[in-house]
Image: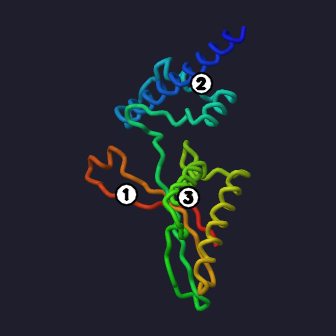
Amino acid sequence: MKKKLQLAGIFTVLLLVFIVGLKGTFDGYYGFYYAEKEYKKPITFTLTEEIIKLKPVSFFLSYTGFDTGYSFFAPNVASDFVLLFELKDQEGNIIENKIMPAFKNKESITRYTSVYNMFLDKISTEDGSMKDNKYQQYLDIIVKQIAVSVKKENPKASTITARLYLYHYPDLKSYQKGEKSERLILIGEYK
């Protein structure tokens, strides 16, 4: 009985990985080749979307990270964030701009930059709008705590402003039209 349960679990996980990959492939293909055209979704595409929308499946995929998907066009490869700190003195003059607190070793920098992955949750995948919930408040507190740490490093600083930016790289169509450079999109400002 235990072996059957284990096999059922393995089969379920592999099936979900396959479904996510299939949906990602459909998204990439139809998003690229039919972006400007009307088309009828194949039943398999619709079915994979409906399966992924089920609450338990959606929760499991988010929890495990399987929902990121890696199709041909890799639409959900994590975006890069940058957190910029602007320190000002009592007169409001900018003393210093920093991108991270001072660290003593490489491991600290790696751990710090891994925090950026959490900020993906500040953006909705559907329409690019901000989500509003307790987790968003938690992420805001993290940014503010990092800002407090950066401010403590400079005794001349009276105020600090932290700005969270998302790197926006050109999509395939923009790239084909000649847009080659990325730009920063402001996600949040914290004082």
User: Residue 136's x, y, as percent?
Assistant: 67, 54
Query: Disc number at residue 50?
Result: 2
Q: CA distance from mark 2 to mark 3?
A: 36 Å
Q: CA distance from mark 3 to mark 1?
A: 23 Å
Indicate the amino acid at tag 3.
Answer: Tyr
User: Residue 10's x, y, as percent?
Assistant: 60, 18
User: Residue 3's x, y, as percent?
Assistant: 67, 10
Q: Earlier in the sequence, mark 1 or mark 2?
A: 2
Indicate the amino acid at tag 2.
Answer: Glu
Query: Disc number at residue 54?
Result: none
**Residue displayed at 55% across by 19% down:** 15
Indicate the amino acid at tag 1.
Answer: Glu
Q: Residues within 10 Å of mark 2 (few under 14, many from 20)?
A: few
Q: Secondary structure at mark 1?
A: loop
Q: In the picture provided, is 95 more to the left or to the right than 64?
A: left
Question: In the rendered image, is residue 15 in sight?
Answer: yes
Q: CA distance from mark 1 to mark 2?
A: 34 Å
Which residue ends up furthest to the front in the rendered image?
105
